[in-house]
């Protein structure tokens, strides 16, 4: 009996190790899932996945919720976010670690403003919204970095490490193609909803604060940055416009080891603009401008 128990434990640990192992997309294949059906004349930007639901954001904060199938998208609802405005580029989206109410359809949605234009005198804002499949959206919290030192340039985008309950700020220090530009990462404890309607973060609050080029010069200082997501302590960073000059490339940054784990050039398979991405099982789902929603299969 003891031997059987030990074998069972060993098998479970092995299975857990295999599931926890990082996915390698070096030899990945690309498949299109479906076309997007958003608001006309607004570029696609942030995207997030919860279960089999995908929320697609567009410039100014237009939102469309889809049911995600292996080879199609079912449009369920379209609405403007509570933070919808010209100052909201809605460049990155993430579902957080809290629900506003335990019976809500989704956890709170975190939306990166990612614009030069200020919102109520603030820049580099993260809008926290309560969304659902039927009720009106509600802005329940606003997170802002008080960047008095000018550590970030054109725009700061926010993402979440749900497993470790961390809020990660990432962006250029000047502008994408600016002389002397670098790409900075700041990591904070995840603010809780109970901390108030407006949460001010300061650089001194950061658990980590570094520029990627200082640690791994293979990450180019000048490129067209898009969205990003965190999966198993790796930050997946899509860049480019899908052109020969600015190709569609996916950089994989190891947040623990502070190094590039991979540089994946998908220009030949996807000659379109990458936008935001999120994990879906072992796959990486990418929102694009021009190719709809695609899956990257390891």
Image: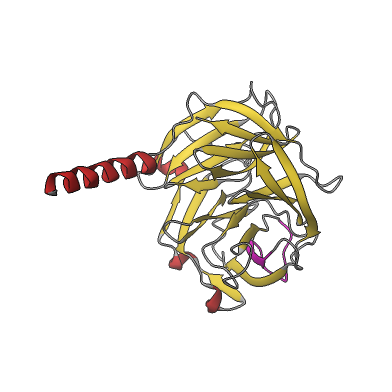
Q: Is residue 121 magenta?
A: yes
Q: Is residue 125 magenta?
A: yes
Q: Position of residue 145 (x, y in %)?
A: 57, 65
Q: Position of residue 178 (x, y in %)?
A: 63, 41
Task: Kindly indicate the quadrant of the structure image that contains residue 151.
Answer: bottom right
> Which residue appears at 28% of the width and 40% of the height?
14
Main secondary structure type of the part rendered in magenta: loop
In the current view of this chain or complex, which residue is farthest to the top?
Answer: 268
> Which residue appears at 50% of the width and 48% of the height?
230
Q: Position of residue 37 (x, y in %)?
A: 80, 43
Q: Which residues are magenta?
A: 116-131
> Which residue appears at 71% of the width and 37% of the height?
72
Task: Kindly indicate the quadrant of the structure image that contains residue 86.
Answer: bottom right
In the current view of this chain or complex, which residue is farthest to the right?
Answer: 40
Query: Does residue 226 appear anywhere in the picture?
Result: yes
> Who is closer to the viewer here, 196 or 298?
298
> Who is closer to the viewer here, 67 or 144?
67
Rendered position, 231 above or below 84: above
Q: Position of residue 286 (x, y in %)?
A: 63, 39
> Who is closer to the viewer here, 273 or 285?
285
Query: Does residue 181 appear anywhere in the picture?
Result: no
- What colour scheme does the image use? secondary structure
């Amino acid at each position: 009996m003891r031997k059987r128990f030990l074998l069972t434990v060993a098998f479970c640990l092995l299975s857990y190790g295999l599931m926890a192992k990082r996915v390698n997309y070096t030899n990945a294949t690309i498949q299109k899932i479906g076309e997007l059906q958003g608001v006309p004349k607004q570029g696609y930007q942030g995207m997030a996945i919860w279960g089999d639901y995908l929320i697609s954001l567009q410039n100014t904060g237009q939102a469309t919720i889809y049911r995600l199938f292996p080879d199609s998208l079912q449009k369920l609802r379209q609405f403007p976010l509570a933070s919808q405005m010209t100052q909201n580029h809605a460049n990155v989206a993430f579902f957080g670690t809290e629900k506003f109410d335990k019976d809500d359809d989704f956890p709170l949605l975190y939306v990166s403003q990612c614009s030069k234009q200020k919102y109520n005198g603030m820049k580099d804002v993260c809008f926290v919204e309560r969304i659902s499949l039927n009720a009106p959206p509600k802005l329940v919290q606003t997170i802002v970095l008080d960047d008095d030192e000018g550590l970030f340039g054109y725009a700061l985008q926010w993402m979440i490490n749900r497993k470790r309950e961390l809020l990660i700020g990432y962006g250029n220090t000047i502008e994408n193609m600016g002389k002397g530009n670098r790409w900075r990462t700041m990591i904070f404890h995840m603010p809780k909803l109970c901390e108030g309607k407006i949460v001010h973060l300061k650089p001194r609050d950061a658990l980590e604060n570094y520029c990627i080029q200082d640690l791994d010069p293979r990450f180019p200082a000048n490129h067209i940055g898009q969205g990003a997501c965190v999966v198993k302590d790796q930050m997946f960073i899509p860049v480019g416009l899908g052109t020969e000059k600015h190709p569609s490339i996916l950089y994989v940054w190891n947040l623990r080891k502070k190094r590039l784990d991979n540089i994946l050039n998908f220009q030949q398979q996807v000659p379109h603009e990458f936008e935001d991405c999120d994990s879906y099982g072992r796959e990486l789902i990418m929102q694009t401008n021009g190719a709809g929603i695609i899956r990257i299969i390891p």
